[in-house]
Image (cartoon, grey):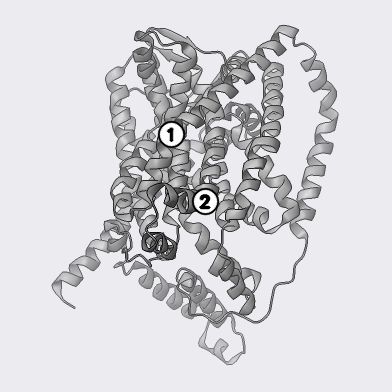
Amino acid sequence: MSARSESSLLRADITVIALAVIVGVGFSQFLTSAQSPFTEAVFISPSVSRLPEYALLSLTRSIIALCLSMVFAILYGTLAANNKILEKTLMPLADVLQSLPVIAFLPGFVLALISLFHGNRLGLEISCILTIFTGQVWNLIFAYYESQKSIPPEFREVAQVYRLSHTHRFFFVELPNGMRPLIYNGMMSMAGGWFFLTTCEAFTLGNKDFRLPGLGSYLAQTFTDGYYFNFLCGIAVLIIIIIGTDFFIWKPLVAWVSRFQESEDGQGREGSLFFETIKNTQLLHLFVVCTKRVLMFLFPRTDLTEEGSTRRHLIGIIDKIIQFFARFRGGQTPRKDRIKRFSFVPLVVTFSIGGLVFSLLPRLPEVGQSMSTLTHDDWFDLIHGVFFTGLKVFLVVIFSSLWTVPIGLYLGLNPRLERIFQPLIQNLAAFPAPVLFPFIALILISIKLPPFFISTILMCLGCQWYILFNVMGGASRIPADLKLVSKVYQFSVFKRFHTLYLPAILPSFITGLMTAAGAAWNASMVAEIVYHPAGVLRSAGIGAELVEASAHGNYPKLIAGIICIVIVLVIINRTVWRTLNLSTERYE
């Protein structure tokens, strides 16, 4: 082995070990924080020296929530795409849940988990992770569901011809087709978690102020106390984390997932320096060898004479685990047997919903009695707020589409430009815009802009990226032969857009509209009430009503506001989104 290859192997091993140590330190700090005695408001030190610790805690929570979101989105999207009965319920439910502001989930998570883990902060940590989860998972669900509905028919025909089992069809057809949109939308989902970072780690319920040590609570505390230098240092650390996650997580994943993309247009795969480095590591091989030797030591050689021995069985399991990571390469002959269908999942879902309903039935009189305390003015404020927030969401979707569709289409059709601008766009999307809302609000107030349009602009800052990433993903999946045909027949730009590009990106564009609208409803809670150095900016809307109801402990009004949002969202889902989805079926 040459000196150059030995140095590259050593560099890869050192890099992997260093990264594993950092991840281990982050998780150990998270577990230490979770096992600490419970206190509502943890002291957040404004010292800059505590920033690495707070940053690791926030990054750990975000990664845990993202992993849960990925697994849940794959399961949820697979069930919805392959079961017509469940599809009619699961997708409208996901659309309603994604549009509910995170403040709607916080009280239930916090109060329930604190009562369950009353001795330590584990309940508060889990509620924070679940709240981040609710800001990440819905975008992934819609992206994966759309990828499953747009699987080319010839792929399904090949799966039927070769009699692939449901397991092999999932690993060789469905999951590879959904990996690219899942990874690209995972960037947006993690950005959604950063978007509500300050809300998830520092929030108020009635007269109780809940805080967890983290970068979000650090930014909120230093800004409130007027430590603007420390606040800017926290922003700098946050930018470093965003760039670091792009280099160590997203670029390697994008490089890995490029193997599932068609390369008929002659474009090469996307590269990643870190991905090329870790491919040279020998640690995985060393781990396998050591594990096998330990098993051979624990189980004597005499077991080899027995058919299906314990040692041989365990070693075979390890080999299968290692081979799992290379399973997408193909070349394996699928088994002839097929997994029989069993309606176990619908049975579990039915009994779970039934048990939840029956457990809540005894509480209905108390809820009804508390709701009766609301006055006509309270209901008028809520209905008035839903109308104005809905109008803002409509404007956000329209304004965002005007520039994201042409830019996303242009970048998606040019892989080289996409590789150049995608990291920049991803880093801009991942930056939590609410931390800059006070300064942006001050600038917009100085030019005498009405609060209605100020909150609309603030909502745009975090929602426009959903449309852009979905349009880019849809454009990048246009088959190369169709683009070649349009060039051979010399289609004009308008005809090419009308007959090829628009039908091809329409399903992804509709998915982007739905997720952007849901994100806009979510962003209303941080865009309609903004605390800035000169005072408070308040715009009429349901987000402001929910935030004020939560801050004052007015839970009946909070529940009534959620009910109003749910009714409006169900109407929009059954009219607008259902019509748009039906119109795209002929293009899939």
Name which of mark 2 and mark 1 comes first in the sequence: 1
> Label 1: how many residues lie within 10 Å, few (<14), some (14-19) or many (20+)?
few
**Residue 78 drawn at (x, y percent):** 63, 57
Alpha carbon distance from label 2 to label 1: 18 Å
Q: Residue 382, relative to residue 307: is it above or below? A: above
Q: Position of residue 262 (x, y in %)?
A: 42, 65
Determine contact: label 2, label 1, CB under 8 Å: no
Examine the image and state in which quarter residue 259 appears.
Answer: bottom left
Q: Residue at x 32, y 63 (%)?
A: 267
Residue 93 shows up from this direction = yes
In this image, 232 relative to 220: left or right?
left
Which residue matches tag 1? Answer: 402
Horizontal side, residue 334 vs residue 441: left or right? right
Q: In the image, what residue type sits under mark 1? A: Leu
| Residue 503 image label | 2
As drawn, is 312 to the left or to the right of 346? left
Seen at 56% across and 69% down, the residue is 155
| Closer to us: 433 or 264 | 264
Q: Position of residue 72 (x, y in %)?
A: 59, 50
Give amino acid for label 2.
Answer: Pro
Establish if 27 lies above or below 119.
Answer: below
Specify whether residue 67 is in view.
no
Residue shown at the point (58%, 35%) measured from the top left: 127
